[in-house]
Structures are given as C-alpha cells and as structure tokens.
Image (cartoon, rainbow, N blue to C red):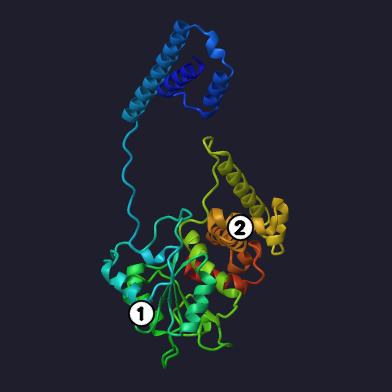
Amino acid sequence: MAPAGFCLVATVCDVAGYADPTGRMALARLGESQLLDVIPSPALLLVLAVLGLFGWADRFRLRKRGQELARETPASPPPAKPESHAFLSDAAPRPATRDVLATARAKPAASAKTEHAPVLQVPQAKPVILVAVSDAFVRGELHHQLHTRYSVVEADDSIDVMELARSLQPALVITASNMDEKGACALCDEIKADPLLKHTPVLWIAPAAGLPNVEDLNISAEDTLSGVANNEALPIRVENLVEVRQYIQHGGLPSVKIDADDTAARLADTLFLENVHRLVDANIGNSLFGLEALAREAQVSLPHLESRLLRLTRLSAAGFLRTKRLQHAMELLEAGNTPAEVAHLTGFHSVSSFNRLFKQVVGVAPDSYTA
C-alpha cells in the first residue's frame, strides 16, 4: 500500500502545485518509512482531496489577481527611437569619414530657429566633437585623448566639413586648417558666419609650437592649442569650451534640492553635491583653495571627488571649480565691480587668466559683459 499511496500523494501534490523538490523528498522519505500504511484509505483520500482543493483555490486566486492588475496597469508606450547617429554610440568603432558624410546627407539640416541647445540637465549621451583635421596622426591622437568623455567624429579633406557640422550640430569643432595670407583661419570664419553654427565654439590646433595666443592672432576661434601629443592642456581646454560653456550660458550650475521621495542613493548624492557647493562658496575668493583642499574638506579622496563629480555633473573637479568661479564672477560684474576686483574676489591667480577664460566661456570680455 505504501508505494501506491506515495504515488497518489505525489500525483495530487503535482496537480495542486506542490511540486517543490524538498516536499517531494519528504514524501519519498514518508513512503519509505511505511507511515502511510497506518493511515486508513478513506482518511488518506480525504486529506488528498483537501490539499487539491486548497491548491486549485490558490491558483485561481493568483490568476484572478493577475488579471485585475493587468486591467489596472495602463499600457506602456513604445520606447522612443534613438537618433539616427548610430556611429556616435559608445560601443561603435571610429566611423569612416565617408560613412559619416553619407549619414549627414541623409539627415535633414536643423531649423534656423534653433540656435541654442536646451537647458543643460546632465545629459546621458556624450557631447559630440567634430575633429576636422587632415593629418591622420593628429586626428588619431585627438580621438585617443577625448573618446572616453565625448563622441568624436573625424573628417579629413575629402569631407564637406560645413555640411557635416550643420547636420551634427556638434558641441565643439576642432580644426587644424592652415592660415591664409591674412593670418586667418578660413574654416573658423566660415563657421562663425553660418547662422546654424555661429554659436559653436572652435578650438584651433596651431601648426607650430610657440605661436601667440588666439587674442594676438587674426583667428576667430575661441581657443588655440599648440600640439596635441600628450598635451595635458587639451582636456582642460575642451571641457572649458563644452561643459563649462554650456553651464554658464544656461544659468550656471543648478541649485541642489532635496526631495523627500529620493532613494537612499540619490539622497546621498544630493547631500554630497550640497556639501561641495557649500565648501566652494565658502572659499570662492581663496586662490589657494584647490582640488586637494576641496577633497580634504569634503572628507573624501581626490579620485573619489573627481569620479563622483564627473558622474553627477559631467564636470571634472577642476571644471566644477572654474564653473562656480565664473558663475560668481558674472554676478559681481553685474553688481558693478571691475574685472580686476572680480578676478581677486573669485580666486583667480591673475587678471589676464580671468579675462582669457571669461571670454572663452562667456563669449565676451569681462569689461564688455555689462556694456
């Protein structure tokens, strides 16, 4: 009777939904111990019938609840299609210039009414940088140094750079085009004369080292750089012309607000940012207050400060400091202070360095800002 009883128990339990392996092993041990022999057959059948009823009732209740939830939950809209720049994805290889131009021709040009990007909200996608350089070595070096933070699109002499730039609307154009007989950069002038691109910053790579700054040249680019190989100034200059410039032109760094519905991780990030803002504001005029001092006051390591600010604001720690100082400098200029006073009150080492950075990022010199 034990084998027959065991098989009957296992069958009913499977039907009722009790197919847990642990339960089946217990039933096996129960059958092996011959305990089923001492249970009368009518009582055994009654127990099995009750188990079956409970199992079917539980299954019916769960199925009914699932149908109710399905009726209450609105259908989710289909996911939005990403932009057609497949070659800009992080996982994509470096695009061939002819493929990039074909994609640019397939995409309609942006409307002339949209000259500025929307308000910056820590974008998830990488900013696009167009590298219009004929030298393959320089293009490769720029891509190597910038691809971790930016989507770098390369164009050589066989590409119509203006057509590609109008299609991409990049955050920055880097060029190394030769100067003409007047000492000007023809591509830079063409970009600044285009209604769709006139607000796009340009970084000009000088053909030789030792050239003067952009202010002393007839170059319409926002900044110049001599050489790119292992140039530590390259990421700083690019960050000034992309992230810092976007923040400043759209009202500065957003204020930090704590929401009661924030998760624990988001609340920790908010409190961290609030503390960093407070520390920088308290030392805004101290030119000796640098990254190490900020990390020490925030009670975190410098690598942690760098990585966390980059994740939360897309700014390096140094870029965060520059943005805060420029944001405060604009307020002081509007209050009637002179550029020399503002440079001292915002912690810049010299008036010339303040004037240069202010014009690069804001677009006008400090003495012309409120004119």
315 versus 238 height, above or below: above
Label 1, secondary structure: give it. helix
The answer to whether any part of residue 336 appears in the image is no
> Relative to residue 153, is residue 319 drawn left or right?
right
44 versus 14 height, above or below: above
**Residue at numbered disc 2:** 307
Task: Provide residue 204's location: percent of width, then percent of height.
Answer: 48, 80
Identity of the residue drawn at 38% across and 18% down: 56
**Residue at numbered disc 1:** 190
Q: Name the residue type under label 2.
A: Ser
250 versus 209 height, above or below: above
Identity of the residue drawn at 44% across and 88% down: 178
Q: Residue 333 sits in which quadrant?
A: bottom right
Q: Name the residue type under label 1.
A: Glu
Label 2, secondary structure: give it. helix
| In front of the other: 296 or 279 | 296
